[in-house]
Image (cartoon, grey):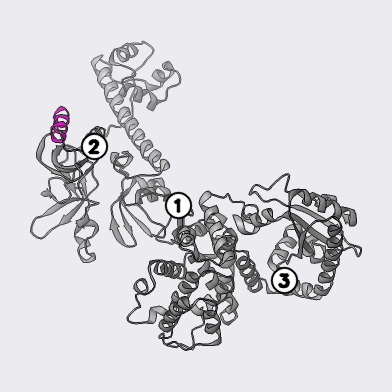
């Protein structure tokens, strides 16, 4: 039984007997942590108290207690999943990840896009939005006790709060957290400005309260005479928001219009305009400060009437008039303030998550249906990863290390030959996950692979990266055509007895063609040999040298090792490499150099101590056939082997062996080993098989 303090007793008193029993178990685990008098960071119980004051659900409070950073000191570690369930374990895991994250740098203040990418990464990587809520409470506790830290750390934490965590709180609609985060961070960053505004507000508090009360009394009296029900109350202003408005409008604090603010909630739309008319009849109003957001809603859907009046003492009072429905939308719905304060766009997933979070905070429910709704769907179309230097890269969901390489620089993509994720080798088709750190392995020469742009093989997701690869091959083809055109031009010149050709005169004859355009047209056969012979016989063309070098291709073996041909190699049976695959060599002690695909599990899962035996290899120019295993899943076994055999025979593909398995639901699996020359041929035949009517899917066996 844990030792109960006044704080923990108050916490337990707000839950049912069953929930209190579970909390007692969590507290008994925390009590086992060795006491450290020098520990000044937030403790789980302290954070749980902050959250409970905001009426969050039981699971959020429990997860806050169990995400105490000091829990890592216990040996053995408690099995949270067994003791408290999957939801709590997942929440604790997410909070611990958020608490350990060290991606932020002060430079992000000058680069809003980097800060926005980090915010999106934090939201996208959490499986449950409540983990972000717990993290915000940890940050509030940290700020409340930040005076014990050094000046440098206080400044860093406060700036990170304003750049990252306060905007996230605003985005999620948790305005209580946003205001406290902003005010406390501002207090450390601009202590003099904070004290001046706080002092001014304190000196004028009595006057402000008197102005508001006089306004409310007179307005409610006249509304009662018109039989209009209303809720009328003063709207508090916060120090950081006051300072921002002073900076934006270049005004002193006593010149701001909305330090005195009143909100009026009425029953229906008609009453909104009736109240506005009464307000304008009782007090002088400032025309340029009137905004009708009911007739002209803000882009985010926000609706309300805003006006500024002058009371009998000349005080400016901002009045907001709205229906209860409008108020609920603004305060509890989809965080209406986000769009106009941050300039962002809402998404359906964001709206759903915010609405669910607000529902939990306001209704004090812990229903499992609501809990299920907290599964994070935010920004699920993006993935956020890190460079080795810690820079955040924003990619489309489903991106691979190759997409990452091209996002860094086109040349890095062209020279990419492998990748490491968090220090471990992975295939180039690996699908990246948010938060992973990627290191790209490159060669000196640019040499993209045709497989990279084959949609069946999954190397690239980004259309931008695919376009870069296609452009590279177009340029390569252009170079080859230029060389071929030069050779054809030289050959035809010699056949006609011309020692050389004046290229300048020939270009002038063909008008707007450049040298490369002309040679490319010849190499592409746009200008055929008969046309070329006719052009070369034109008298105006005089003999001269053509200085276009021809690159000779050497004859290679099937595979070259570290740029050397004719090295004895063998192909691994575990992954069956085919010409066109990305490959890697492994120096074995008994079998020489074995060639594997780079995505072979025996390579990607190779122990660190054996990775030094990997060696760079490449395909040569000689062709060879390869035995490739494939797996075909079909709806029905009837005639499956016959139909596939006929298709392969028609495509001149030899079958080495075949095995057909049938299943109780009448579906079938056909295992084939076929003879393939390269990955292009493999991709074509897999596409043909997949188009057959009985086929569920077909893939290369890994």
Residue farthest toward the right in the current orientation of the protein: 312
Determine the CA span between mark 2 and mark 3. Answer: 71 Å
Please tell me which of labels 3 and 1 falls first in the chain: 3
> x%, y% of residue 528?
30, 16
Residue under the point 81% across and 52% down: 289
Determine the secondary structure under disc 3: helix
Residue toward you, 268 or 182: 268
**Does residue 624 appear in the picture of this structure?**
no
Residue under the point 16% across and 35% down: 640
> x%, y% of residue 555?
17, 37
Question: Which image quadrant for residue 261?
Answer: bottom right
- Residue range (magenta): 639-653
Nearer to us: label 3 or label 1: 1
- Does 649 appear in magenta? yes
Please tell me which of labels 2 and 3 falls first in the chain: 3
Please tell me which of labels 1 and 2 falls first in the chain: 1
Residue farthest toward the front in the current orientation of the protein: 227
Predominant SS along the magenta part: helix
Q: Are marks 3 and 1 in contact (CB under 8 Å)?
A: no
> x%, y% of residue 246?
75, 62
Residue toward you, 244 or 444: 244
Nearer to us: label 2 or label 3: 2
Q: Which residue is mark 2?
A: 695
In the displayed structure, would residue 683 be above or below residue 21?
Answer: above
In the displayed structure, would residue 188 be above or below residue 331?
Answer: below
Q: Which residue is mark 1?
A: 380
Residue under the point 33% across and 47% down: 415
Determine the CA span between mark 1 and mark 2. Answer: 31 Å
Q: Which residue is mark 3?
A: 193
Determine the secondary structure under disc 1: loop
Determine the CA span between mark 3 and mark 1. Answer: 40 Å
In the displayed structure, would residue 262 be above or below residue 274?
Answer: below
């Amino acid at each position: 039984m844990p030792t109960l303090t006044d704080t923990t007793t108050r916490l337990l008193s707000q839950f049912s007997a069953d929930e209190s029993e579970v909390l007692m178990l969590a507290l008994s685990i925390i009590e086992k942590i060795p006491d450290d008098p020098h520990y000044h960071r937030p403790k789980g119980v302290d954070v749980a108290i902050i959250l409970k004051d905001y009426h969050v659900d039981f699971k959020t409070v429990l997860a806050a207690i169990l995400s105490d950073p000091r829990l890592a000191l216990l040996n053995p570690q408690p099995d949270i999943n067994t003791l408290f369930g999957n939801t709590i374990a997942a929440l604790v895991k997410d909070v611990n990840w958020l608490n350990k994250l060290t991606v932020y740098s002060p430079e992000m203040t000058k680069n809003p896009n980097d800060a926005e990418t980090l915010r999106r990464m934090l939201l996208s990587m959490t499986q449950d939005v409540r983990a972000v809520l717990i993290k915000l409470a940890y940050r509030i506790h940290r700020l409340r006790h930040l005076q014990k830290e050094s000046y440098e750390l206080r400044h860093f934490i406060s700036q990170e709060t304003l750049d990252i965590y306060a905007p996230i709180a605003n985005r999620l609609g948790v305005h209580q957290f946003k205001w406290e985060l902003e005010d406390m961070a501002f207090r450390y960053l601009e202590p003099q400005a904070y004290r001046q505004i706080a002092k001014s507000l304190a000196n004028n508090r009595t006057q402000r309260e008197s102005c508001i009360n006089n306004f409310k009394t007179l307005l409610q009296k006249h509304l009662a005479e018109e039989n209009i029900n209303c809720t009328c109350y003063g709207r508090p202003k916060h120090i950081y928001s006051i300072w921002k408005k002073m900076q934006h409008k270049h005004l002193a604090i006593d010149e701001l219009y909305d330090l005195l603010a009143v909100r009026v909630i009425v029953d229906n739309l008609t009453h909104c305009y009736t109240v506005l008319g009464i307000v304008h009849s009782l007090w002088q109003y400032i025309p340029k400060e009137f905004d009708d957001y009911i007739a002209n809603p803000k882009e985010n859907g926000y609706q309300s009437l805003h006006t500024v009046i002058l009371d009998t003492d000349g005080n400016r009072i901002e009045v907001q008039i709205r229906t209860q429905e409008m108020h609920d939308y603004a305060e509890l719905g989809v965080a209406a303030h986000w769009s106009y304060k941050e300039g962002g766009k809402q998404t359906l997933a964001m709206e759903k998550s915010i609405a669910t979070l607000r529902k939990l905070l306001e209704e004090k429910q812990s229903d499992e249906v609501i809990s299920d709704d907290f599964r994070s769907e935010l920004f699920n179309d993006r993935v956020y990863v890190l460079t080795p230097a810690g820079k955040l890269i924003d990619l489309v969901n489903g991106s691979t290390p190759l997409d990452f390489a091209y996002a860094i620089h086109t040349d890095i993509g062209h020279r990419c030959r492998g990748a490491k994720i968090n220090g471990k080798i992975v295939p180039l088709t690996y699908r990246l996950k948010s938060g992973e750190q990627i290191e790209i392995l490159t060669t000196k020469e640019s040499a993209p692979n045709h497989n990279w742009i084959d949609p069946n093989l999954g190397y690239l997701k980004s259309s931008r990266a695919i376009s870069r690869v296609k452009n590279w091959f177009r340029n390569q083809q252009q170079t080859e055509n230029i060389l071929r055109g030069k050779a054809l031009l030289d050959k035809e010149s010699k056949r006609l007895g011309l020692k050389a050709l004046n290229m300048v005169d020939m270009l002038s004859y063909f008008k707007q063609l450049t040298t490369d355009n002309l040679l490319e047209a010849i190499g592409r056969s746009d200008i055929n040999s008969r046309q070329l012979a006719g052009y070369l016989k034109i008298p105006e063309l005089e003999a001269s040298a053509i200085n276009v070098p021809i690159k000779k291709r050497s004859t290679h073996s099937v595979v070259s090792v570290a740029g050397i041909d004719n090295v004895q190699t063998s192909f691994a049976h575990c992954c069956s490499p085919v010409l066109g695959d990305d490959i890697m060599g492994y120096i074995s002690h008994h079998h020489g150099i074995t060639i594997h695909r780079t995505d072979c599990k025996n390579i990607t899962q190779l122990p660190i101590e054996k990775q030094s035996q990997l060696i760079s290899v490449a395909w040569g120019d000689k062709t060879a056939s390869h035995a490739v295993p494939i797996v075909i899943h079909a709806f029905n076994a009837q005639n499956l082997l016959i139909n596939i055999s006929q298709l392969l025979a028609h495509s001149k593909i030899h079958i080495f062996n075949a095995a057909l398995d049938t299943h109780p639901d009448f579906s079938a699996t056909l295992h084939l080993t076929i003879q393939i020359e390269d990955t292009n041929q493999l991709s074509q035949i897999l596409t043909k098989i997949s188009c057959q009517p009985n086929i569920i899917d077909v893939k290369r066996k890994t």
